[in-house]
């Protein structure tokens, strides 16, 4: 099931993402994006708009992720970090549709470590096309 979810969660090469969300650094294989990367607002039960992009927030960390946390996230999909005030915001995505983000969020919530993940929405379609690195393979 995790492999099928990785395929669903991985944006295709034709997807777009705002220029400000390109990785500015890579630490231990994890992409770090600038604070200028738009991450929108948490939906927290609100209905999404029709034209938004979606992130799943997988946590706020005081330091780079430990092995157990990293494994719990990478089981489902690749992630990136956005530094903020001495912490790191863990994000997966972006996803083109709410349904896609919802499916991944619900799968994450099956794990006690990931029970608090939630969906964020950035309104409108960002402008720049990027190719995301493929999901890591187990083994």
Image (cartoon, rainbow, N blue to C red):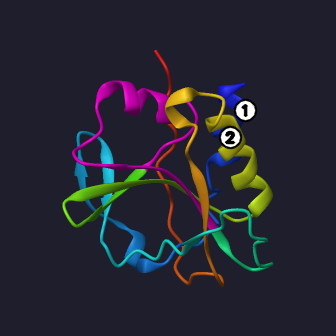
Residue under pointer 2:
7
Residue 24: x %, y % from top left? 26, 65
Q: Is residue 136 among what the camera can see? A: no
Res. 129 in view: yes
**Image location (x, y in percent) of residue 31:** 33, 53
Q: Which residue is mark 1?
A: 4
Q: Are marks 1 and 2 in contact (CB under 8 Å)?
A: yes
The answer to if 56 sits in the magenta stretch is yes
Helix, strand, or loop for circle 2?
helix
Quadrant position of residue 115: top right
Crowding at mark 2 (Cα within 10 Å: few <14, some 14-19, many 20+): some
Does residue 103 appear to the left or right of 111 in the view shown? right
Q: Residue at 46% x, 49% y: name it.
A: 133
Q: Is 126 placed above or below 117 here?
A: below
- Indicate left or right for 86 with 59 as reference: left
Q: Which mark is residue 125?
A: none
What segment carries the magenta color? 54-79
**Quick check: 136 above or below 57?**
above
């Amino acid at each position: 099931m995790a492999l099928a979810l990785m395929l669903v969660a991985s944006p295709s090469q034709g997807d777009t993402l705002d220029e400000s969300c390109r990785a500015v650094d890579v630490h231990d294989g994890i992409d770090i994006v600038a604070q200028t990367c738009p991450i929108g607002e948490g939906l927290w039960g609100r209905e999404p708009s029709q034209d938004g992009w979606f992130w799943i927030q997988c946590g706020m960390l005081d330091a780079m992720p430990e092995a157990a946390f990293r494994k719990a996230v990478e089981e489902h999909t690749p992630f990136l970090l956005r530094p903020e005030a001495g912490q790191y915001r863990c994000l997966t995505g972006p996803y083109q549709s709410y349904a896609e983000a919802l499916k991944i969020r619900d799968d994450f919530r099956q794990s006690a470590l990931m029970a608090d993940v939630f969906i964020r929405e950035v309104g409108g379609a960002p402008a720049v096309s990027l190719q995301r690195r493929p999901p890591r393979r187990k083994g």
